[in-house]
Image: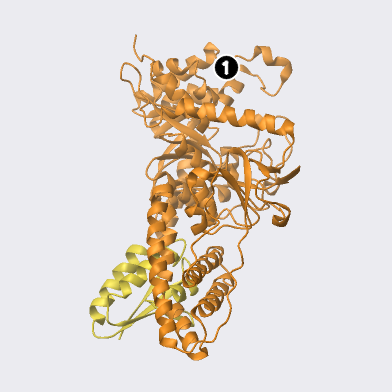
Chain colours: A orange, B yellow
Amino acid sequence: MQKLQGKAVCRGIVMGPVSVLRKEEQQVKRRRITDADAEILRFTESVEQSKLQLVELYDKAVMQAGESGAAIFEVHRMMLEDEDYLDAIHSMIRTEMVNAEYAAAVTGDNFSEMFAGMDDAYMKARAADVKDISERLVRNLKGEIETGLLYREPSVIVADDLSPSETIQMEKENILGFVTVHGSTNSHTAILARMMNIPALIGVQVDLEQLHTGMTALVDAFSEEVIFEPSEEMRKKAEEKIRGEQEKLLMLQSLKGQQNITSDGHKIDIYANIGSVSDVGYVLENDAGGIGLFRSEFLYLGRNDFPTEEEQFLAYRQVLQTMAGKKVVIRTLDIGADKKVDYFGLENEANPAMGYRAIRICLKRPDIFKTQLRALWRAAVYGNLSVMYPMITSVEEVENIRAVTEEIKGDLDREGIPYQVPEQGIMIETPAAVMVSDELAELVDFFSIGTNDLTQYTLAIDRQNEQIEEFYNPHHKGILRMIRMVVDNAHKAGKWVGICGELGADTELTETFIRMGVDELSVAPAMVLKVRKKVRPCKALD
Amino acid sequence: MKKFTYEIKDQLGIHARPAGMLVKEAKKFESSIVIRKEEKESGATKLMALMGLGVKCGDKIEVEISGPDEEQAFEEMQSFFSENL
């Protein structure tokens, strides 16, 4: 038994036989040739053959991973048409009178080193692409077919790293999961794994020499660990977990593509709550209509300094592009004394839930707030973005937010940076906000009711405190009346209203919410289909 | 010979995909088209060299076009950059 940690790039849990992918370092021998023209002709044929293969791979990737996942193979094909690259190989064949395999391998290494030496993470990662095409050329020159990639039974693929062409060529049905020693979350392999929805762990410090094909691996990409040769007890537990996951899936699969519509024809949106870019896969996988709550805290946690505007922009843009026009509601920073981040320099507070947090920090530290807003405004160009502000208690706060957004808008205009003003709404999670929701509704585009905090503040109950558990009643009439009041006030002003707290996924209340006229429920991705199942037999009217 | 300068607005700079598109576009013309960033330059039809310039968002590049169809190439390259990069 050997247990190792890694970084999950696509979640899930699987167990099965290991298949170790050892890249035989292609042995390329330098050979003297006598007829350079014939050798160049041979090389040109292998280029043409490679291009045909890449067209096929492109088509395959489009089917398995979509247009954007496939784009890399088009780039590979264009690299094979690169004048400098081809000229370098031709001239090496001619001047040194060496075989095409050798010329292609050496040239590939040179170009790939050029990319590896660049100071930009994106360009560095292109070194692997140049290697990939050079290896393809050599393979074709040698008349070898890509082997070792066909698995007869579903396996966990363990490798040092995987090239995009390796990943896409494996039969999807026969890949249980990926475990790699190297690779980054930016790599194409990670992107493809996510798009194909195959559990994958990267950065696992495993010695490939110690493994052999046929060993059993348990990949738990929820807890981000892989166990080789798990004990009987571990297997049993894992099997149970896997069965549970599968049953859930099967039961709900049939609801994919179906509408969230009641038996009397009333529609409601069901969106998903997520907390990181990599969760977007689950949103799509579970057929959510959009993202109703994207917590932006992940950008701020686990680091030593504030994320830059650029970093934030890229993350938001990626999500918007992946969601391709579906609504994405991003909540601005909701950090406070309970979710501590050292570099914010927050002090310990006696009552953090009621303390210096969320919009209160943003309004007192406009530097932090503006950076995030600028990134959001810029990203809004790339999709259907809505921005939502947390912990609102008053009309004045919303007016203060507006002053900041006007300011960044003016700045962006002056700097000539493209942006779009997103739809803007607020969280309703304090009793005060409920009571003035009629006035707030005039100022914003939508409401999203955060039931967790709203319940805590309304019932004056700390949910972490076990002693008072018996007093905690999330279905308290007081809460439900508040929700009704918020919905009515939003609709009077012609605005939409959603619920993004835990109560949104409480299927005992689904019908109640539909009857109140709630427009959207935002729930954990895994709950989307469950709530849909609940919605369909409901009646909106008696 | 005709020249124009352009400031890159695409957040990723001249990355793989737009570089590929640029190559395709540049190959339509007989004129030679050179992309220059500071002291480095590359032919617009050379994918890897182009990527190797490491052009980032906010960088100013110079595009130099010379040849029989330089008038038309000048127009079309300008609109290519403003639409794609």
Quadrant (top left, top right, bottom left, bottom right) of the N terminus of chain A: top right
Question: How crowded is the residue under tag 1: few (<14 C-alpha within 10 Å), some, or many (20+)?
Answer: some
Q: Position of residue A234 (x, y in %)?
A: 72, 33
Q: Is residue A431 visible?
A: yes
Residue A261, compared with residue A424, is above or below; it is: above
Mark 1 sits on what residue?
A474
The residue under label 1 is which amino acid type? Pro
- Above or below residue B57? Residue A443 is above
Is any atom of residue B9 visible in this view? Answer: no
- Percent x, y of residue A403: 46, 44
Residue A67 in the image: x percent, y percent?
38, 52
**Residue A123 in the image: above or below residue A354:** below
Quadrant of the rendered structure where residue A447 is? top left
Point 44% across, 56% down: residue:
A411
The quarter in which the C terminus of chain A is drawn is top left
* Picture coordinates of residue A162, whole percent (x, y): 57, 57
Name the residue at 55% across, 32% down: A391
**Nearest the eye: A355 or A280:** A280
Q: Residue furthest top?
A: A542
Q: Is residue A377 left or right of residue A248?
A: left
Please, which chain is the residue tagged with disc 1 on? A
SS for dot 1 = loop
Q: Residue at x 46, y 76 (%)?
A: B49
